[in-house]
Image (cartoon, grey):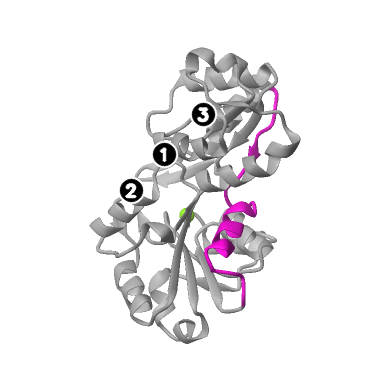
Amino acid sequence: MDFQNSFDHFVFDLDGVIYSGEKSIGDSPRVLETLRKDRKGIRFVTNNPSRSPSDYARKLRELGIRSHESEFVTSPMATVSLIREKLPSERWKTVFVAGSDYLKKEMSRTGLVELSVDDSHGADLVVVGSHPGFSLEEIKAASIAIGNGAGFIGTNGDHFYPCEHGRAPATGALLASVEAASGKKALTAGKPERYMFDLLGESGVTPTGKTLLVGDSLRTDIAGGKMSGYRTALVLSGVTKKTDIESSSVKPDFVLEDVSFLLQSQ
Ligand SMILES: [Mg+2]
């Protein structure tokens, strides 16, 4: 497969694809620069709810990768879409947000009034997204509000992310603790749900045969991309091992060691 000449748009997951921690993967800066020179459309989609597009643009710049804030689709953006879809049938007026400042800023676009942790027990809706300073107080406030009848939405369902020494808890792990305490199950907005893919479509990157979605997770990137009609490439530089593919019902169109292989004819 000649990826460069076969596709007009490339959609990249970030963690495990473009970088791992603070290091780029598989010469991703050169891959992206080459695709830009070829005038390919580029987008980045990430389930990590703690950073804003300007944060990501800065992080990529530090790795030597050019990007524009408008190229990022995040799970907090998807959460806004999910809430807007639900609002006509729900009586939500107030929200308690257990998450980053960026998530709170996105939530302000829903028109819901944000309640502080002190008033959170009476919230109509609770939104949970992991962030570096996540606290037991946030889990407690979220659990109480949901137990009192609040709606319950998580930015994404990822259970863990790989860190230097092993698995670190992601939003899905935090949701599990709130679910256990409240007895209620969260709705989630990030990949594999369709909301981020709908936002991609709205930004002009539709699932024609000329768009390739590149991700490291079968469960989120590849399953979600396939459900939304995108062609998909799994990279083995992140959370998925080759043996995982055989045991999974989710089959990517292509399997690559890392993003460098996009510049080679297979
Ligand atoms: Mg990833």
Q: Position of residue 85 (x, y in %)?
A: 68, 44
How far apart in space, not on screen, are marks 2 and 3 (Cα)?
Answer: 20 Å
Query: For the residue marked with disc 2, what is the amino acid?
Result: Asp
Q: Nearer the viewer, residue 138 or 237?
A: 138
| Residue located beneath label 2 in the image | 55
Q: Nearer the viewer, residue 138 or 42?
A: 42
Whether tag 2 and tag 1 are in contact, CB under 8 A, the answer is yes
How far apart in space, not on screen, are marks 3 and 1 (Cα)?
Answer: 11 Å
Kindly identify the residue that appears in the image at 50 percent across and 59 percent down.
Answer: 216
Kindly identify the residue that appears in the image at 62 percent across and 18 percent down.
Answer: 145
| Residue located beneath label 3 in the image | 97
How far apart in space, not on screen, are marks 2 and 1 (Cα)?
Answer: 10 Å
Kindly identify the residue that appears in the image at 64 percent across and 42 percent down.
Answer: 84
Query: For the residue marked with disc 3, what is the amino acid?
Result: Val
Is 186 within the magenta? yes
Res. 60 image quadrant: bottom left
Q: Check the image and report above or below for 266 versus 203.
A: below
* Label disc, if present, on residue 145 of the rendered structure: none
Q: Position of residue 111 (x, y in %)?
A: 56, 34
Kind of element beneath mark 3? strand
* Magenta range: 183-208
| Residue located beneath label 1 in the image | 102
Q: Is residue 75 left or right of residue 185?
A: left
Other-residue count near label 2 (Cα within 10 Å), few / some / many at <14 / 14–19 / ≥20: few
> Does the Cβ of the disc 1 residue fall within 8 Å of ligand 1?
no
Res. 163 image quadrant: top left
Kind of element beneath mark 2? helix
Query: For the residue marked with disc 1, what is the amino acid?
Result: Tyr
Q: Position of residue 237 (x, y in %)?
A: 43, 61
Kindly identify the residue that appears in the image at 52 percent across and 47 percent down.
Answer: 77
Is 213 within the magenta? no
Q: Which circle's residue, 3 or 1, is located before the other in the chain?
A: 3
